[in-house]
Amino acid sequence: MGQYTASQRKNVRILLVGDAGVGKTSLILSLVSEEYPEEVPPRAEEITIPANVTPEQVPTNIVDFSSVEQSDDALAAEINKAHVVCIVYAVDDDDSLDRITSHWLPLVRSTCNSADGEPDEARKPIVLVGNKIDLIEYSTIDSVLAIMEDYPEIESCVECSAKTLHNISEMFYYAQKAVLHPTSPLYIMEDQDLTPACKKSLVRIFKICDIDSDNLLNDYELNLFQRRCFNTPLQPQILDEVKSVIQKNVPDGIYNDAVTLKGFLFLHCLFIQRGRNETTWAVLRRFGYNDQLEMCQEYLRPPLKIPPGSSTELSHRGQQFLIAVFERYDRDGDGALSPEEHKMLFSTCPSAPWSYSTDIRKSCPTNDAGWVTLHGWLCRWTLMTLVDVVKTLEYLAYLGFNVHENDSQLVAIHVTRERRIDLAKRQSSRSVYKCHVIGPKGSGKTGLCRGFLIDEMSKLLGKEFKTNVVHCINSVQVYGQEKHLILRDIDVRHALDPLQPQEVNCDVACLVYDASNPRSFEYIARIYIKYYAESKIPVMIVGTKCDLDERRQDYLMQPSEFCEKYKLLPPHLFSLKTNKKELYTKLATMAAFPRFQAAWILFYKHRYLRQFGLMTEDPNVWLKAGLGVAAATVLGFIVLKAISATGTHGR
């Protein structure tokens, strides 16, 4: 990827103003013709300089103003259209110099304020230009510097001569530079210091470049920084000179032959003081900042095309980057992030993308202390990537993915093929599946979801779940491959409550009822008939709390009869008390092979009848009788055996 320029303008518009006779028009004509014009018109026509002949490679429009030919309203319009205003005075005319503060600067300020209505907004950059330097043998710069202290919008000043062409090109370069590399967002002239926004941005950049997190930039880290920002290595001699300058001016700017944060900030302050704003801006823009020192939306959220029916997952590069970030901030090497380590990790972001105390502990695997493990860390990012990929893109940018990987964070995302293709091929190529766990309040579905995160589910018995965390994620093995399963907890308060499309659509549905409550099954029976009976989404009926007495359900059919009628797998009886977790593998397998539900049912029927001696030992008799297309597929039979191996019931 090329160097990112967060605020690359399409053009620069320069307006020249000043008293009559100071030489505004002569300056423009001398630049274009490279010779002094003997006859000067009242006003030069607007001139466009192509990008390939400007130092910054940006097309530049130069606009002249004449009080003889134009009105005050025309002047106000031109000031507002301009990106930078050059106020020209004659160095041999003290009155034109005095008019800078008595007339021109207040006029530009008031015009800009009345246009945007915000007096405190960033003001229009201004360059003061002293023309006719060939007529005097002294300089007016000292007088101009005093003006600059009172008007922070003045970016620079230059003395030149339209007649001898002295500093003509430099004058227009400074004007361009005032637009492309402005000083005011970076530096406070009266304080001789960086602005708070600039310091904050540079601190974040320092942290991202501090790979070993020791609060120092060593030679290796400085070289990487140099390459990433300027596409060139830092020569050892230059590096030593830089350190020497820092050491001389900031005693604690160097520590153990490495640059401290204070030294890093001083270096950029020095660049700006020496007129090298473009160096600091190149760094800021490489890290995604715009002219207002805010992260660019294009940098945070590059456009990602997701076809209907496709989903988003972390790519291998995305996972490797996140593993590296985790290990970098796991200071004690215990394989988990403490709250303090987690806070430090996201110190380069506006805030953490989730709550550590509530969300992280209840949505992904943690250690016994409730600290997120590396496995849980990847799970949580996998969850965010599926349900809010834009947020993943943003936080990868905040963490420095674009710089460390020298590529857009789009390469950290894998867009899966459309689900209709998965259905046609009868297997899914995805590695992340979404399961909606739907059931009435009190049915035990929240316990079912939370049990997915821990090894000893029995610890959750009798626990009251006060915090409502919508998603839980963990990994399961499907045919020896790691798949991530996301359980979304969806409440159904009343049997007739409508579900929204986003609550229905998923890779596999888990409809939960309380096997000990006679009125519980009716809820999910109605849900199935209304939303899933005609859909292609695999469905598993789960009866929870099977360690209690199983009650006959007050419904037209009992759960097993219902499943038989609608060609569903027999109800899976589940209990936290048993610590058996085969349900989650079943759900993931059903999601991975969405078109084999009929095959699963027939296989279980065959297994049940053979158990009681009611069926021939040849399973092909049943397969040929009722399986249809799936019977002819070897893969379908393999799926059956895989699910069968986990068992039907949880007790």
Image (spheres, rainbow, N blue to C red):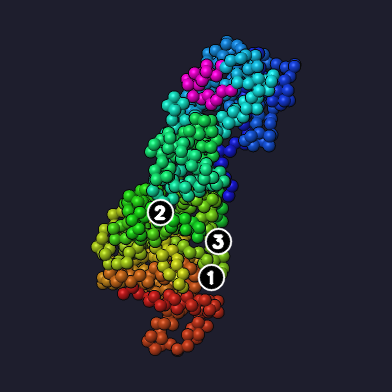
Closer to the chain start, of discs 2 and 1, is: 2
The disc label shown at residue 418, or none: 3
User: Label 3 amino acid?
Assistant: Glu
C-alpha distance separating marks 2 and 1 = 41 Å
Q: Position of residue 246 (x, y in %)?
A: 44, 37
Task: Tell me which residue sits at (36%, 55%) in the image.
Answer: 330
User: Label 2 amino acid?
Assistant: Arg
Q: Is residue 4 visible?
A: no
Q: Quadrant of the C terminus?
A: bottom left
User: Any magenta on residue 147?
Assistant: yes
Badge 2 marks a residue whose secondary structure is helix
C-alpha distance separating marks 3 and 1 = 13 Å
User: Any magenta on residue 64?
Assistant: no
Magenta region: 140-158
Does 252 sit left or right of 142 as displayed?
left
Q: On the image, which quarter does residue 331 sit in? A: bottom left
Q: Residue beneath label 2, please? A: 328
Contact between marks 3 and 2 (CB within 8 A): the answer is no
Q: Nearer the viewer, mark 2 or mark 1?
A: 2
Q: Residue beneath label 1, please? A: 426
Closer to the chain start, of discs 3 and 1, is: 3
Task: Tell me which residue sits at (48%, 64%) in the image.
Answer: 431
- The residue closer to the viewer here, 642 or 187, is 187
C-alpha distance separating marks 3 and 2 = 36 Å
Q: Is residue 510 visible?
A: yes
Task: Tell me which residue sits at (40%, 72%) in the image.
Answer: 562
